[in-house]
Image (cartoon, grey):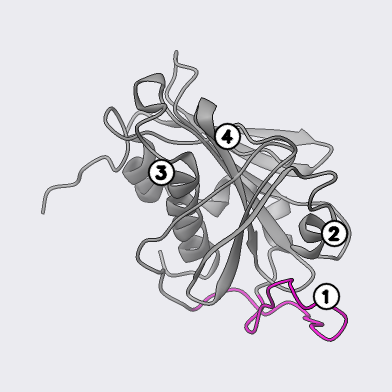
Amino acid sequence: MRRATLFLSAAALAAISACSTPTVDGSPAPTSGGPSPAPSSSAGLPPDVPKVEHPIDVARFKQDPCSTLTEPLVDELLGPRAEAKRTDGAAGPSCRWSIPSTSRPVVHVIVSDFGDSGTARFYAGKGTAYKLLEPLEPIDGYPVTAYGVIDIRGQGDCSVALGTSDTQSLGISSTLSEANVGKKDPCAIAREAAIRVLATIRGGN
């Protein structure tokens, strides 16, 4: 069976940053299984904050954020030449995948270090800290929320928060290739990356 690069050239991918933009749109859901559940406390969440019925503990990925995507799944998103680079910033440990000698496309995953509020912190900043905040189609029951301090989707950038429990989330960002800016939805691409991240952290791939 022939393997194709999902978004390279005519479709590109992504970068992630806890303080960049987001947005998203649907695709097949990942398989289940994997890490031990994380504690969840839906009771105190505001009514508009999506709840996570089957929490996943992502703490172990803080040690190795580049393990949030397997090499075959990175190949699907960016192509076989993509390289991973770990970074550590204020938002938490992260991993950035890109093609050497190019600035775009990029996929970036952040294992958030922000409190114990999950996606609730994004909703709390709606209209103030985050000018962009849109709930996207959940992935196999796990909420996905596009967010941004400003809305830069028109520039080919989007960030989404993948809720892994009511107290934890992962940030996933996508930056399109210049050829695909205005032609592809960067939030849809970020959601495609989120599908593969969820598959990895659940142990399905």
Using the numbered discs, state the Cα–Cα distance from disc 2 to disc 4 in whole angstroms.
27 Å
In this figure, which residue is indicated by the disc labeled 2?
A: 124
- Viewport quadrant of the C terminus: bottom left
Give the residue type at disc 1: Pro
Is there CB contact under 8 Å for labels 1 and 4?
no
For the residues bearing labels 1 and 2, Cβ distance under 8 angstroms: yes
Q: Nearer the viewer, mark 1 or mark 4?
A: 1
First in residue order: circle 3 vs circle 4? 3
x and y, in percent, of residue 178 in the image = 41, 20
Quadrant of the rendered image containing residue 4? top left
**Which is more foreground, mark 3 or mark 2?**
2
Compare marks 1 and 3 and give the one earlier in the sequence.
1
Labels 1 and 4: the sequence-earlier one: 1
Q: Position of residue 114 (x, y in %)?
A: 85, 53
Judging depth in this view, the residue of 18 and 132 nearest the camera is 132
Q: Which residue is mark 3?
A: 74
Q: Which mark is residue 96?
A: 4
Q: Which mark is residue 46?
A: 1
Most common SS among magenta residues: loop
At x 64%, y 84%, the residue is 53
Residue 180 left/right relative to 102: left
Image location (x, y in percent) of residue 25: 45, 56
**Distance CA(mark 3)–CA(mark 2):** 32 Å
- Per the rendered image, the range of residues in magenta is 33-55
Whichever of callouts 3 and 2 sits on the residue coming sooner in the sequence is 3
